[in-house]
Amino acid sequence: MANINPLSNPKGVKVLCELCRSLAYVQCTGCKVTYYCDVEHQQADWSSIHEKICQLLIPLRTSLPFLNSAEERCHCMEQQIQRKKHLIDVTMKEAQKLLFNGKHQDAIPAATHSLSFSIDVFGLTSVELVPVYLILAEANIGLGQLAQAEHYLSEAYWTVLKTSDCSNTIRSKLHRNLGLLFSAKGDFEESLRHLSNDVYFASTVSGTNDISASGGYFHMANIFFWQNKMNIADSLYSEATDIWHAHLSRLVQVQINASMRSESALIDDTDPESLDENQEAEARQILSAILYTREQAPKKKPLKMVKTLHALTMLYFLSMDLQKAHELGKKLLLATQQLPKQDSLEAIAVLLKLIESKLSAK
């Protein structure tokens, strides 16, 4: 973390804390343009997002030079807007990744930054603010701060209602968060209604078998599981697993084809067929939870266990965590021995061989 620089209370100038907007007494010595009310808030911001954007804040918060022409001033303002848009993207992606990894407290400072920059660029009533409201709502739900979550969801809901051309992707995410809120309140009927809307709106964009719909199925399954409606829960867990299994199988095949063309060819972050960090994190969250549920079930279902393990092994292979992929691969191999028939396992054998070859080449 950047060194702490205590401030004397500035005369005539109000310096506000980056996180809570109260008077600040501590300065980040890395950028010298960010302030905090105390060391605790500085540490929270640093561990969440500030380390990644510290230097990016300097040109935004440094006084602009005097410019003679309107053209120069317009160009300078456009540069500032582009810098803010870049920071919106960076902070939102980081907040979402922290959420998927269960770090709800850490996600809030990153999302707060994203909301602040979004308001500056798009204005208070823009639909562009909705994704950030939803991240803040989900983080607060995870922390059990339901009143704060409800506040952010109300802002998101009214913004969507007032926006006639709001995308179904945003509507899907809004209903998912409303579903999570009502689930946390124990209102499972209302939660299921919103999660069904989540799947519906996601399906209108990419189809019922797209990974964007998998989260809705997964969260509905959790509710039925808590209600001890195991058959419905099992069916929905299978739906989520099948979606990810099919998607990951396609990506693995792309990599296998690439490897056949060139041994050094790997899927990179710019490949349209690759997973981004947030998709990886969501897949880990969903598939790991489903695997745990299946492992704890009194009556094991070998075929479903194999499919879940296969999907997780593919996921870690694609994210280049070969050691974890190898560990899961060994569990997968043992699980296949529980199947009544040993046919149709060629894809698993190819994957395990590929993992072994990548490990031995390191």
Image (cartoon, rainbow, N blue to C red):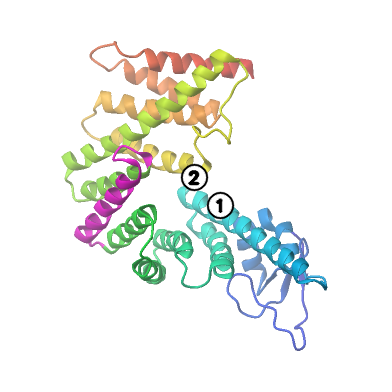
In this view, the residue in front, 131 or 223, is: 131
CA distance separating discs 2 and 1: 9 Å
Relative horizontal placement of residue 74, taking residue 205 as reference (left or right): right
Q: Position of residue 239 (x, y in %)?
A: 27, 36
User: According to the image, label 2 marks what residue?
Assistant: 278
How many marks are shown on the rendered structure? 2
Q: Amino acid at mark 1?
A: Glu
Residues packed near mark 1 inside 10 Å, few (<14), some (14 to 19) or many (20 plus) = many
User: According to the image, label 1 marks what residue?
Assistant: 94
- Is residue 1 visible to the viewer in this orientation of the structure? no
Task: Name the residue located 40 percent from the left edge and 66 percent from the top edge.
Answer: 156
Task: Name the residue located 77 percent from the left edge and 60 percent from the top edge.
Answer: 30
Q: Earlier in the sequence, mark 2 or mark 1?
A: 1
Residues packed near mark 2 inside 10 Å, few (<14), some (14 to 19) or many (20 plus) = some
- Is residue 158 visible to the viewer in this orientation of the structure? yes
Task: Name the residue located 52 percent from the left edge and 42 percent from the top edge.
Answer: 277
**Quadrant in which the N terminus is drawn:** bottom right
Say whether residue 359 is magenta.
no
Q: Amino acid at mark 2?
A: Asn
Say whether residue 197 is magenta.
yes
**Quadrant in which the C terminus is drawn:** top right
User: Which range is magenta?
Assistant: 186-211
Q: Position of residue 217 (x, y in %)?
A: 28, 44
Q: Position of residue 114 (x, y in %)?
A: 56, 62
Q: Position of residue 241 (x, y in %)?
A: 32, 34
